[in-house]
Image (cartoon, rainbow, N blue to C red):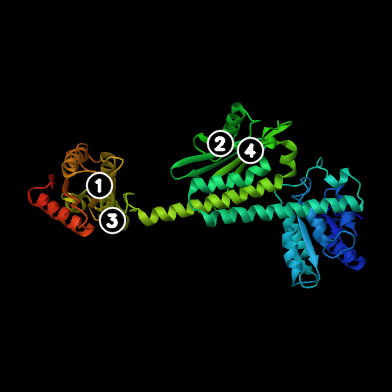
Amino acid sequence: MTTTAPKNPKALQVLLVDDNPIQLSLLRHLFQRHGHMTIEARNGAEALIVLATDFPDVVVSDCVMPLLDGYQFCRLVKDDRATRHLPVLLLTAQGTGLARFWAKTCGADRFLVKGRDLDHVVEVAAALAEQSSKPRTAHAVPRLAQENFGVDAIQSRLAQALEQRLLETALRDSVARLYTADHDTPRLIQGFVEILQELVLPGALLVAYLGQEGVWCHGVHGSSVSTEDRQSLEQSLTKQGPFPIPPSCHWHPAADDDERRRSLRDPVLRVYTATTPGYPPVGALAFITERRASDDFERLFEIAAEELGRLLSLEDSRLRLYHQAIRDPLTGLYNRKHILDMLGMEIDQCGRFGQNLSIMLLDLDHFKAVNDRFGHAAGDQVLSVLAQRMSFGLRKVDQLGRIGGEEFLAYCPQTELEGARALAERLREYVAIDPIPTLPPGDRVTLSIGLATWEGPEDTPERLLSRADKALYQAKAEGRNRVIG
C-alpha cells in the first residue's frame, strides 16, 4: 500500500517490513503523518520481491518474522550490489542480548527498540535516507529478482551471504594478526599481498604506500598478465591514487600452478584508495582479475582496501612517532639519546670485529652572538641550515646528531684519526663557504671540531667523548674555526 503526501517537499518512499498487522499499521500512520509514502511487506521474502520493482529511500524492518527474518533480509540486501547502499533500520522488541549484536553484524545502518525508541523512528529513517551517499539506481536489479523467489534460492543466497561474512571476518583477522606480528613496512605490505592474492589472482595485484620517504610499491602477478597489463595497472594507480609521482613497483610472479596459468576471459582493472577515517590517504590497492570475480567480491575488496588503509595508517603513525622519538625537531638530525645509543652500538661492533672508529664533536662558533644580534628565530634558522650542510658534507656511512644547543656529534665508522681529520677539515670549509639566508651577506658561521678515535676494547663511549670534548675545548681556546685531535 502506497500513500502520497505532496505537501512535504522531502517526502520519502519507505519500505515497511513487519509480520504484525497492528505494528505495521502503527508504522504506516507514523510515516504518513509526516508526509512520507509507504510500501509494505509481511516478511523478508516479500520485501525482496518489492525491491525487484520498487526503489524505496529507506527500509524499516522488524527483526523476528517467519520465512525470512529481518537479520537475514538485511544480509541479503547488504550483500547485493544493487541494494547494498539502501539504508536499513531494524526494529526489535528485545533491547538487550544478541539482538543488538546481530543487528550490527548483519549490516543494519541503525537499530531501535520498539516502545522505547519508536517515537524517533521517522526521524532516524529520514536521517539515514539523507546520509545515504549512493542511492540505488533504477537499472540496478537485485540478483534474487533474476531468479525464482523459492525457498531454495533464498537459502542459497543466505548461505553465500554467510560465507561472505566469514571471508570478511577471516580477512580482517588475518590483517590484524599481520600487524601484530611484524612492524617492518615492506614485510607488512608483502604479507598483505600474500593474504589477498588468493582471492584476486589469476591476474595481477599491487599495493602502494605513500610514506615519508616517498612511494613504495609491491606487486604480484600470474603468468596470464603481460608486462603491458602491469604497466597499465601502474598507470591507473598513478591517475587514481593519492600519489604525487608515479610509483615504481617491485613485481614478483605468483606460484606457477594451473590456476595462475589460466587466461583471463573477461579482465577488469580496479583501483581502491586505502584510507582510514580521520587520516589522509596513505596508499592504494589495484588489481586485474575476472569481471565476475570483481563483481562477486566487490564488498570484500572494499573491506580489503579499508583494512589496508588501517594497516598503513597504523604503520605511518608508528613511523612518525618513532621519528619524533629519535629526531631533533628543529634540525631533523638524530637527537642526543639516539646518537649516543648508536655510538654505543658502533663501539660494540668495533670491539667484536676489531674495526676503527673516530668521532667529531662540532660546535658553532660565536652562536650566542647570532641570537643576541638577530633574535632566536634567526638563530634557529642558522642551526637548521648548518645542520643540513653538515649532513651533506659527511659521507653516507657517517652518522650525525645534535647533542645540545649548538653542539653536534658525528661518528665515522672504519675511519682512523687521520682520515677523520681530513674529513673534518673538508666539512669545516664546506659549512662556511656560503652565506646563510637570515644573516648579512658578509657574515659566516664557522665550526670548531674536536676529534677522538677508539683506542681498543678497554675504551668506553664516555672516555671517547671526553677526549673529543677536550680537543674541542682546545680548538676554541686556539681561536676557533679549526680542527683539533
The crowd level at tag 4 (other Cα within 10 Å; few <14, some 14-19, many 20+) is many
Alpha carbon separation for disc pair 4 and 1: 49 Å
Q: Nearer the viewer, mark 4 or mark 2?
A: 2
Left or right of 44? Residue 212 is left
Q: Position of residue 9 (x, y in %)?
A: 78, 52
Q: Secondary structure at mark 1?
A: loop
Quadrant where the image shows the N terminus = bottom right
Residue 388 numbered tag: none
N-term-proximal mark, 4 vs 1: 4
Q: Position of residue 71 (x, y in %)?
A: 80, 60
Left or right of 120? Residue 169 is left
Q: Nearer the viewer, mark 4 or mark 1?
A: 1
- Residue beneath disc 2: 252
- Residue beneath disc 3: 344
**What residue lies at 13% left-to-right and 52% top-to-bottom?**
471
Q: Secondary structure at mark 2?
A: strand
Residue 287 numbered tag: 4
Q: Secondary structure at mark 3?
A: helix
Q: Nearer the viewer, mark 1 or mark 3?
A: 1
Q: Say which amino acid is labelled 4.
A: Phe
Alpha carbon separation for disc pair 1 and 2: 38 Å
Q: Say which amino acid is labelled 2.
A: His
Alpha carbon separation for disc pair 3 and 4: 46 Å
Alpha carbon separation for disc pair 4 and 2: 14 Å
Q: Is residue 10 visible?
A: no
Q: Nearer the viewer, mark 3 or mark 4?
A: 3
Quick check: marks 3 and 4 in contact, CB under 8 Å? no
N-term-proximal mark, 1 vs 2: 2
Q: Say which amino acid is labelled 3.
A: Gly
* Quarter location, residue 422: top left
Q: Say which amino acid is labelled 1.
A: Gln
- Residue beneath disc 1: 355
